[in-house]
Image (cartoon, coloured by chain):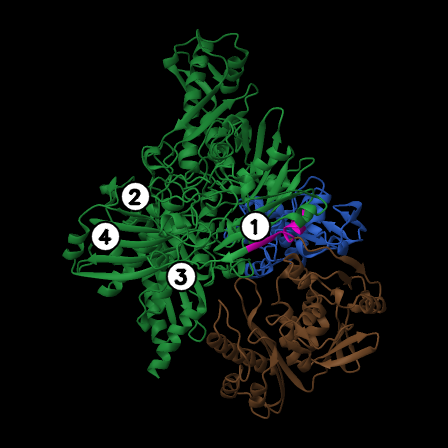
Chain colours: A green, B blue, C brown
Amino acid sequence: MAEKTVGKPIKRTEDPRLIQGLAHYVDDIRLPDTLHAVFLRSIYAHARIKSIDTTAAQKLPGVVAVYTGKDVAKIGPVPCAAALPDLKVPDHRALASTKVYFVGHPVAVVVAESKSAARDAVDLIEVDYQELPVALDEEKAADAKSPVIHEQFGTNVAYKLTAGEGDIEAALKSADQVIKQRILHKRLAPIAMETRGVLARYYPGEQELTLWTSTQIPHLCRTQVAIMLGMPENKLRLITPEVGGGFGSKLNVYAEEALMGWISMQLNRPVKWIEGRRENMQATIHGRGQTGYIEIGFKKDGTLTGLRYNVFADMGSYFQLLTPAIPTLTGLMLSGCYKIPAIQINVTGVFTNKMSTDAYRGAGRPEATYVVERALDLVAAELKKDPVEVRRKNFPQPNEFPFKTATGLFYDSGNYQGALDKALKMADYTKLRQDQQTARKEGRLMGIGVSTYVEICALGPSAAMPAGGWESATVRVEPTGKVTVLTGASPHGQGEETSFAQIAADELGVGVNDVTVIHGDTAIVQYGIGTFGSRGLAVGGTAVYLAIQKLKDKAGKIAAHLLQVDASTISFAEGKFTSSAAAGKQITIQEVTLAAHVAKSLPEDMEPGLAATSFFEPKNFTFPFGTHIAVVEINKETGEIDFQRYVAVDDCGKQINPMLVEGQIHGGIVQSMGQALYEEVVYDDQGQLITGTLMDYALPKAIMIPHLELGSTETPSPVNPLGAKGVGEAGTIGATPAIVSAIVDALAPYGVRHLDMPLKPEVLWQIINKKSAGAA
Amino acid sequence: MKKTISVTVNGVTHQNEIEPRLLLVQYIRDVLNLTGTHVGCETSLCGACTVMVDGQAVKSCTMLAAQADGSTVTTIEGLAQGGELHPVQSGFWEHHGLQCGYCTPGMIMASAQILQRNPDPTDEEIRHGLEGNLCRCTGYQNIVQAVQCAAKKMKSKSVAR
Amino acid sequence: MIPASFDYIAAKSLDEAISLLATHKDDAKILAGGHSLLPAMKLRLMQPKVLIDLGRIKELSYIKEEAGQLRIGAMTTHFQVETSDLLRRVCPLLPETATQLGDMQVRNKGTIGGSVAHSDPAADWPAAILALDAEIVATSARGDRVIKATSFFVEMLTTALEPGEILREIRIPGGKGKSGQAYVKVRHPASGFAVVGVAVNLAADGGKCQSAGVGITGVSPKAYRAANVESGLKGNALDAKTLSAAAAHAADGVDINSDLYASAEYRKQLATVYTRRALEIAASRLK
């Protein structure tokens, strides 16, 4: 009998192939006769294309074809799934035709026998551009005087949206005080270590196109690419092999995916495109990109009365799949883990001459958490109260769940005090504050930052999602007793091959290694949604669980038939069916499975086989939460930051595999550290991408990161039978405010109350230096 | 003008005619079809392409295949010996030192070199040693633990001998 | 990722390399470890027609004492410098610089000669080379030419090497009396290059500074000797006050770089602070 595995740190079943270099990412798949595609991309942020001459490129030996915008006009537009009222949707085509809108905008594609020939030919294409004035800053671009990017709209404002509940004017009026703060969320590059890549193979006889692509959403991508190519969806097979990270950047449908399919259909040969890193930084979506204005109203005792957030959201020049929807997620989460009676968000979505923004780990929610947490710190500073006390004062109590927010959400379950208290204890907060007193007396700049966050996960109820929020699973017990799980989730590092196997193994009483989890092939797996929004386990895992319940129900009936007892007397545990009506008799799941397949003795009217499918539709989102505490010391002479402690207590509901949970938290926190301290996509005033390689765009390295101290609490979610909430994005949501708060706290003696990320040493030094100079 | 090179990779000697501009990583991946070695940046920074050339961990994207003529190369596929995982590989598995797995082959090769030179490293020394390897998933903490675990395994092995 | 086409010739000897360079002239580039050249070629920022690889010339890889000098062959890798017992004993500044350069893999393959000849304004070696008063031996069909480090770095990516010359060796003069050395740097968070790198080589006798070499990289379009820092030290007792006062002149008289990470004003501050730290460490090692 297999041991129970749920709740245990089981080693991942996917690892053996990965640690031996035997896994297959897109570029590792080799087909005979494959052609290679390389793009020519715009070197200007905004320009009219006067002419393109591809003659020389076409003549280069090895070159098979060169395509420009006019050649590919039949490919339908790149889709945007966000449906907002009065949304201006630009016509986003696979290649630019008359104008280019950002540096990296694809202008032409060369297809050749070798990648080097294709690359050489790109240098031979001549494009005559007429440069146009650029609109880059989301706030300035919204101004009527700004150069307009999409002339047909006459404005760069893509949409305006107001959301929230409660009378915000009255709420702010009723406050003893209102604090206003401008706040920036800079653009970030997701930088999955594997760039994007597509391999397309068309069989003209069968009229079947197979696409191997590095995506988080195989089925949605197939549907959309089929629409773009005008082909029947069931003639398009999309395979997601190993995916080297996504972080939201592959929760999308890109022009290149459809274009490779189209090229393969033109040339009747396989064609492959592997994105370079510089291309990736120019032409894979960016995240964040907001300039906002906070107004927070509060009473003298720290009670919050209302929050307004007016935000200019940088769309980039085109919409990708969810571009305009991301700020709406910010709006949803503006209550944080606090009681705020009235909340309003006013979003102005603005086109700019830059790559599109879209979902990057957290997708709109880190922005919300950052806004709320910064606001709480501002309130605490104004009232000269401990930031912890202001938070505690506004928490809903555990018995107030489900808790309704003024953003229209019902938080499923929570114990915010519990996580906070645990984190304070782990960090020895009281002692830290004493140490800080001592440090300040000694002239040292020590800072402590606390963030208490809640996030929205397990996306989500379909009614609230652009294209379905459910997830599917089929569970089969094969005649030999091995278990096959087909999931619509599409893991790319989260370890769901293991965690789903744990669920199946425990439910069926088999070993984890008896379970194979198959995902990411639309020809094998029933329709699914994919992996994003911390939904894999809580939605996809639940579908697995529910499919197994159906399957067990059927197996139980077969068992009863075989044991010659009434089905109502059957129970199942540890892989065996027993009957209260027949003591001592039992039959294993394997025996039942064989019987189901051999089908010689089944209950009347029962279909043979042992498989079940579930499409799980969640009734609500889930709301994980936690407390993060950062402790820093800043060098007065250089502004350099030394992390002294980092403590995080996260509650993601029931944990299926705590080792995987910790891994997700680690990774998220470190991405947050990147955002807080280093990362920023910078375009210059001509729209040139200054941070165009990893030599300029700083990802955190091992040496830059402190040891993280993790703890957890476990408040099960009532939304799904697993009690799981989701954890993929917690780190990126909870950590950023804690780090910024710690640094601001360290500089409090200089009167600092807020600073915008990334908090580079120079920014800090300038503050210290100016004040010191002023005092001198 | 093409060049003929002879390179011994994971114990097998290969002779190929190549373009001088062919990078070692392209030779390994596209000529020899050993696709465990990955490309992650373009600028010699991410270390996903790390392999051993004559016992030295190098970034195979920053070396021409022609430069490796006559060399002995070990890639991630050649690290496990006799069907047994290298201690670093086991360490990564046991301590969840990988998520998406893309940086992993390079991380493992670099870690193997760290331990070869310093069998008893501090966490700080491991982090310093991995400066040339980027990971976007793990936050590095479990990687450091994985390397420490491998160090222990290697030590107990050498004691057993 | 794919360089433009070129011809590749692996020189078997230094003489062959010299003659190949004489034949191909400006069309050719010398390939040492490749860690400066190949990245530029992959981005097609450089497109030489011929690469002359020195990698097979064993005679260019050595670290030895000769004629009262330390002599380091151009093809010596950063790692060989980092782990050289001889250098750790007699010139620890070089291993200390090497260990902070690039990363482990880069140090394994990259060479001191290649890096110095490339003269990147944020490379680490030039600071140490300058602080140590090194000489650079360039060789060509005309024979050897010895160039003082102080006149070697001409400007960004430009050295005193003349057409047809190959950097063959780096010579470090032998120390006089007690010496104290140190290299400290501010790493750029992305590239790892020096935002500021300061190499210090002090000699003292009877508590007084006899000679001081202070090389600074990353601050200016080319690495430089901080003359005013050095003059503030020479002849003085190396107490905290002297070191601090001298360090204040770290960026005297140079054009200061400015980029996304550090403005000129901030870079100057970093140069001052890191120079003081380097001096303090070096002075402490005198004891």
Amino acid found under the numbered disc labelled 3:
Met
Q: Secondary structure at mark 3?
A: loop
Amino acid found under the numbered disc labelled 2:
Gly
**In the image, which disc is placed on residue A394?**
4
Identify the residue position indicated by label 1 in the image: B146
Q: CA distance from mark 3 to mark 1?
A: 32 Å
The chain letter for the residue carrying disc 2 is: A
Amino acid found under the numbered disc labelled 1:
Ala
Magenta segment boundaries in residue numbering: A118-128
Q: CA distance from mark 3 to mark 4?
A: 26 Å
Q: CA distance from mark 2 to mark 1?
A: 34 Å
Mark 2 vs mark 1, foreground winner is 2
Counting residues from the start of the chain, the first of labels 3 and 4 encountered is 4
Identify the residue position indicated by label 3 in the image: A757
Identify the residue position indicated by label 2 in the image: A414
Mark 1 vs mark 4, foreground winner is 4
Residue under the image location 52 percent in, 10 percent down: A599
Q: Residues within 10 Å of mark 1 (few under 14, many from 20)?
A: many
